[in-house]
Amino acid sequence: LATMMLPEEIIAIPLSLVLADLPLFHNDLIGTYAGMILPLGAWGFSILVMTEFMKEVPVELEEAARIDGAGELRTFFTIILPLCRPALGVIGVFGFTMIWDQYLLPLIVAPEPGMWTLPIALRSLRSDEEVGIGVLLAASLLALLPSIIAFLAFQRQFMRGLTSGAIKG
């Protein structure tokens, strides 16, 4: 949660040092796809949204499941998780958009153009003098499309997740 309150640029140097020599495993993740994925795995926003959403799930539902003989895993997968669909939709949209638009992490981790994400590739297109503004705008629009598709796919859960805490009842 502490990284949510700090700009991404502040953790760039410590992150690059950790990725260059992963603690306990002593692996170098610079230049690997794992180096781009692992730091995003424990995103504080997802943990915060799920924690706050699960606090609102009535305890009576869990107690009723226990009385009916359901174990902890069955209660979680059949009762709690389906109730969390709105929160999962919010996390899905924001998480996908954050990963898709990631700029700083691939800039640190990806040394070669074959590993670059779209924002870095667009930056390199911008610096190329042979590429016109029309090509750059078309590429930017194409880079935006997956985020729009992700929002439209999760729109119902996203809106329910945003409004679920607004109505008491």
Image (tube, rainbow, N blue to C red):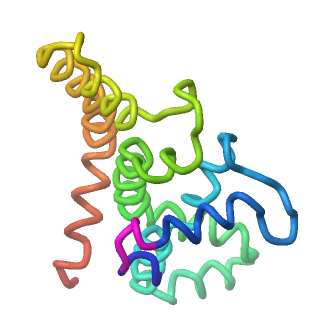
* Residue 81, quarter of picture: bottom right
Q: Is residue 153 left or right of residue 108?
A: left
Residue 99 vertical position relative to residue 82 in the rendered view, above or below? above
Residue 112 vertical position relative to residue 33 in the rendered view, above or below? above
The extreme left residue here reads: 134
- Given residues 60 and 73, the one toward you in this image is 73
Magenta stretch prevailing secondary structure: helix
Percent of width and height locating residue 49? 40, 73
Count of numbered badges drawn on the protein: 0
Q: Is residue 154 magenta?
A: no
Q: Please state the extent of the stretch shown in magenta in the rendering.
A: 6-10
The extreme top residue here reads: 130
Percent of width and height locating residue 151? 28, 43
Q: Is residue 105 left or right of residue 71?
A: left
Percent of width and height locating residue 42? 58, 67
Residue 49 vertical position relative to residue 131 in the rendered view, above or below? below
Image point 36% across, 61% down: which residue?
A: 86
Image point 23% across, 10% down: which residue?
A: 130
Image point 49% across, 65% down: which residue?
A: 12
The extreme front residue here reads: 129
* Residue 72, quarter of picture: bottom right
